[in-house]
Every structure is written in structure tokens, then in C-alpha cells.
Amino acid sequence: MIESILIFFWALLISMFSIPTIISVAHSKRILDEPDFRKFHDINTPRLGGLAIFAGFMTGVAIFGQMSPGIQQLLAGSLIIFFVGVKDDINGVSVFKKFFVQVLAAGIVLFYADVRISSFQGFMGVYDLDVGMSYAFSFLVILCITNAVNLIDGVDGLAGSIVVIICMTFGTFFYLYGEASYAYVCFALTGAMVGFLRYNLLNARVFMGDTGALVSGFIISVLAIHFIEMDRAASAPALAISILFIPIFDTIRVFIIRVYRGVSPFMPDRNHVHHYLSDLGLSHLQVVIVLSIVNLAVIAFAFFFTYLGNSALLIIIGLFAVLSSLLLEILLKKMGTRVNA
């Protein structure tokens, strides 16, 4: 417990005290995020907050964490993604290069640490996966979750708050199940993100950028896979998806909308849940509170009804996601506040 508290506060302090300097340098070098039709800020804002998040996380794990084999590969993959994220936030990086680096980072974790999903644990009657399917599906999971966190980073404090909820939940489970090395990773990222939120939650003075979002997403994807593979929590796959509900729900939703409209699923637009809630008149803070409560509610539901099994839980969560999306569409049409997306 003492180590968990130390790693949390170390990461928090490193992150929080690094950001003023990062903001100053970003303004002096004009490394700023400019407003456009999809964004809510109306002034140029530094986007290098991911530097502080990574510094707090990495030093916290390096000093207080446990360097088990899986953790070493996770940190190596995070470091690779960190560098491409920094380059993207400063000068821009092609989609292909970002994808290649993410595949490389995923490969390090999958092939060198063997952190992969080997079983669906009875979901839709599927148990053990063959090796090829296991690697392919795990690659897909890492890539999707890594980018899902980036996609929800559209409102002040939203991505950071959801990451805190996810990491605290996984960290609590890991700690209770004796997985201290992974629990320390969770608490380090939580602390670093809380320090960042000090400057991002209200009237954001800095954004996490691709550096913070992609690194956080990658770490969370590995945590989710390890949580499922522990096979200690009942209905672990369904519980993991409930913990990641908001990023997964929003990503799948916008991809379906884009494909339905005949545009590329990777084309930016204003169809994210946070855009819809803002169009309904909610402030940034209210959007963060609503989506955080929804994520916590889904986690609580899955935790208290694990006895239903993976298939039943995921069907119920899926139905809730569909109904929530339809409700948003209906409310916006009635209010007539939806702008052209």
C-alpha cells in the first residue's frame, strides 16, 4: 500500500510541476493547437501536456515499480509511442507512420512478453483461441484501444478523467489479486493524469496531445489484456469492456456513423458523444461529469452482475450503448441544435 501511495504522488507531483515550464516553452516555440470546426477552444493552446504525463508515469514506475518481464515490454512500447507522439504534436506525422509505430509497440508486448488474449472465456460459446487468432485479435485490441483514448480527447478534462477512472479500477483489481507490478503501473498513470488535469479540467491551459492520448491508450490496452488473461475476476472480458466503456462505445459509434454515411471511418467529424452532449447545451465540465458517471455506472453494473456471464453482460451493455446513442439522436432532433457534422 505504501508503494502505491508513493508512486501515485510522485507521478502527480512530477506531472503537475512540469506543466508550467512546458506551457511556457510551447508558447515561445509556437507549438500550439489551433481552433477549428471540430474543437471547442477558441484560442491557441499548447498541446504538449503528454510530456508531463509521460515523465510522471515513467519515473514513477522506474523508481517505485517492479520490473517484471511484462512491465519491461510495456514501458518499451510506451517509449516508442511517446517519441512518435511528440513528433506528431510538434511537426505532424503521417497516419501510416503512427500506425507502423503502434504495430511495433504492440509486437514488443505480444511477442516478447506474451501478453495476449488466449481465450474468450465462454463469450458466445468460444473458449480457447488458436495461436494465430490470439495474436491477430490481440493486435486489433491494442490498436483500437490505443486510438480510442485519442478519439475521446475532444473536451477539456474528458480523456484524462476517463483514463483516471479506468486506471483506478484496474489498479484496484490488480492490487487485490496480488498483481503489484501492474497495480503500480495503474497508480503511476493515475497520478500523472491527475497532475495534468490540474491544468486541463477547467479552462484548459494545456492539452495532452497525441503524446499523452496514445501513450495512455497503449498502456490501458495492455492492462486490459492482462486483466482478462489473469482469469481471476468472474466474467473478466465483459468486466474489462465495461471499464473501457466510454472509449469503446464512442469509437464504435463514430465508425458506424461514418461508414453509414459513405465516408472514411478515419475522417474527423463532430459525431463524437462529447460533441452531441455539447450541442445539447452542456458545458465542458458537465460533459465530463455525465460521461464519467455513465462509465462508473456501467462498471458497477458489470461488477455486481458478473454471475450473468460474459455473453449476457455484453449483450446488455451493447443494448445500453445502442439505446443511449438513439436517445442522443432523438434529443438533438427535437431541440434542433445539431449543426452540420
Image (cartoon, grey):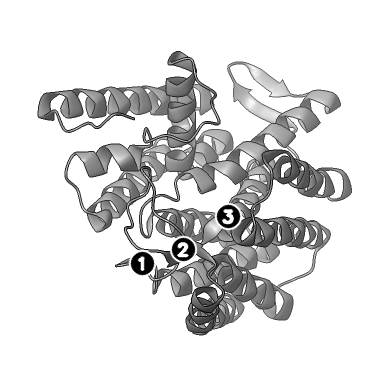
The answer to whether residue 331 is seen in the rendering is: yes
Q: How far is mark 2 from mark 1, CA to CA?
A: 7 Å
Q: Residue at x 12, y 24 (%)?
A: 334
Position of 225 with respect to 23 (left or right) is: right
Q: Residue at x 59, y 50 (%)?
A: 217
Q: Residue tagged by mark 3?
A: 210
Badges 2 and 1: C-beta atoms under 8 Å apart?
yes
Residue 3 image point, x, y percent: 61, 79
Residue ranking furthest to the left: 335
**On residue 314, which mark appears?**
none
Disc ID at residue 204? 1
Per the image, label 2 sits on a secondary structure element best described as: loop
Which one is nearer the viewer's eye here, 30 or 181?
Answer: 30
Above or below, 271 against 171 in this view is above
Amino acid type, callout 3? Asp
Cα distance in 3D space between marks 2 and 3 = 9 Å
Residue bearing mark 2: 207
Write the residue at 42% across / 65% down: 45
| Tag 2: amino acid | Phe
Residue 10's x, y, as percent? Answer: 57, 82
Earlier in the chain: of badge 1 and badge 3, it is: 1
